[in-house]
Image (spheres, rainbow, N blue to C red):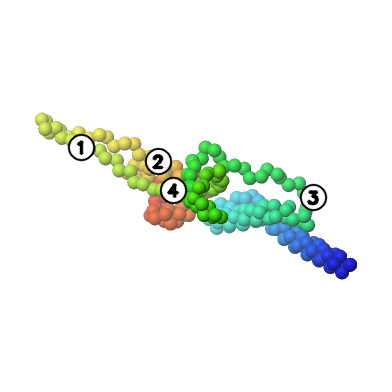
């Protein structure tokens, strides 16, 4: 009887602890959802206020609010599987059951093989045969690279008439400019599609070791 009583007490204690964890998780989720709703409301109001959102300070504030909203939504999405796995933390809202989607098949793959042991860790035998392999895929990004293209136009002189010939200069998007077509397209896309101001683009270039001040970018745009 004593053993049964101890088991009942332990079960009650475990149930009480699980209920306490559930209450804490629900309160935390409710608080995060309220913050998400508040941020969405602020962002919507700023976007409706054209004059406030168009100023430099307004754009910075809007970008900061959107970043906070993204972090909160990410935290909620990460906590959701943990709450679903705990039987004491359940909600009536339907949950998506998509699972992790595979990475695109057309992306280039770099195969990194971890060296396998040459001896059996149990008995020390070196008579090992391959049984199979486990592959883990990780998505990675390659930082953009800069290069300088030297366009060489050779100059020749005629030994008979002493005239000088040279190929014409190729077309350039900006007369006497140093920006190539791909660099210009990157600047324009960041400014008009990503809404990234030129001063922030100049700061980003500086962090990558490229000195392009805001006035130069403005002349190109």
Mark-to-mark CA distance, 3 and 1: 79 Å
In this view, which residue lies farthest toward the left? 160
Closer to the chain start, of discs 3 and 1, is 3
Residue where numbered disc 3 is placed: 92
Q: Secondary structure at mark 2?
A: helix
Residue where numbered disc 2 is placed: 181
Closer to the chain start, of discs 2 and 4, is 4
Q: Considering only vertical position in the picture, is 119 above or below 23?
A: above
Q: Of residues 93 and 167, which is closer to you in this image?
A: 93
Residue 165 x/y as whole percent? 20, 33
Q: Secondary structure at mark 3?
A: loop
Q: Which mark is residue 155?
A: 1
Q: Of residues 167 and 51, which is closer to you in this image?
A: 167
Residue depicted at 78% across the width and 61% down the height: 18
Closer to the chain start, of discs 3 and 4, is 3
Q: Of residues 64 and 29, which is closer to you in this image?
A: 29
Closer to the chain start, of discs 1 and 4, is 4
Q: Is residue 4 left or right of residue 188?
A: right
Residue depicted at 41% across the width and 48% down the height: 145
* Quarter residue 149 falls in: top left
Mark-to-mark CA distance, 1 and 2: 26 Å
Of the residues tagged 3 and 1, which is closer to the observer?
A: 3
């Amino acid at each position: 009887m004593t053993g049964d009583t101890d088991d009942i007490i332990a079960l009650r204690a475990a149930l009480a602890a699980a209920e306490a964890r559930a209450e804490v998780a629900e309160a935390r989720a409710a608080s995060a959802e309220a913050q998400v709703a508040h941020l969405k409301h602020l962002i919507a109001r700023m976007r409706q206020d054209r004059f406030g959102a168009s100023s430099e300070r307004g754009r910075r504030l809007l970008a900061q609010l959107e970043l906070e909203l993204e972090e909160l939504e990410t935290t909620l999405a990460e906590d959701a599987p943990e709450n679903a796995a705990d039987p004491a933390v359940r909600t009536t809202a339907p949950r998506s059951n998509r699972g992790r989607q595979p990475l695109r098949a057309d992306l280039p793959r770099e195969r990194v093989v971890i060296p396998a042991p040459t001896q059996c860790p149990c008995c020390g035998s070196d008579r090992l045969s391959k049984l199979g392999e486990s592959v883990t895929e990780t998505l990675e990004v390659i930082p953009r690279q800069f290069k300088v293209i030297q366009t060489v136009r050779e100059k020749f002189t005629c030994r008979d008439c002493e005239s000088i010939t040279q190929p014409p200069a190729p077309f350039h998007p900006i007369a006497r400019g140093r920006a190539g077509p791909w660099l210009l397209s990157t600047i324009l896309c960041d400014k008009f599609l990503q809404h990234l101001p030129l001063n922030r683009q100049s700061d980003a270039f500086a962090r990558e070791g490229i000195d392009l001040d805001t006035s130069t970018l403005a002349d190109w745009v």
